[in-house]
Image (spheres, rainbow, N blue to C red):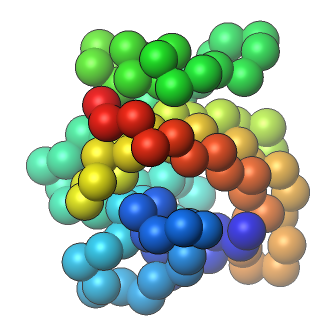
Amino acid sequence: MLFDDGGVDFDTDPPTKASSPDPRIDAYNGDGSIVTYGWTLKNVARWSGEDAPNAEDCAGLLQTHAVYEADYDKGSRFCVRSRGLERIVFVEFLEPIDTAWEIQVTVWNTRA
């Protein structure tokens, strides 16, 4: 999916794009950073492992290293917690496309 100046709702199946200030947005593009909606919500953590994580890996990382905003570039990978259903999400930034980024998203229904 594309990550652009709007946001993403990870609580829908499949995840959908949403426009600010939609309260369903879980993460949005902060001009080169992934930002979790609401400045007080720390729901994103950079994944630095060599292999992709599973839901438990991401849940553990979010409990210990979550922030509300993190810079990204090609190859950046993050664990994210959705706001509504508290789903665990793995996001990988693949390629820039015009003013957006192509991202690959894995969503687990497991709650954090």
Residue at the (71%, 43%) spot, across then down: 92
Residue 63 appears at what percent x and percent y? Answer: 28, 20
Residue 49 appears at what percent x and percent y? Answer: 67, 12
Residue 17 appears at what percent x and percent y? Answer: 54, 79
Q: Is residue 99 above or below residue 1?
A: below
Residue 68 appears at what percent x and percent y? Answer: 30, 44
Report if residue 10 is visible in the image. yes
Quarter holding residue 66? top left
Task: Name the quadrant of the N terminus.
Answer: bottom right
Residue at the (54%, 67%) spot, across then down: 13
Q: Is residue 110 above or below residue 61?
A: below
Residue at the (58%, 58%) spot, across then down: 32
Q: Horizontally, is 68 left or right of 33 in the view?
A: left
Furthest-left residue in this view? 40
Q: Horizontally, is 91 left or right of 99 in the view?
A: left
Q: Nearer the viewer, residue 18 or 101?
A: 18
Task: Name the quadrant of the C terminus.
Answer: top left
Q: Is residue 71 above or below residue 67?
A: below
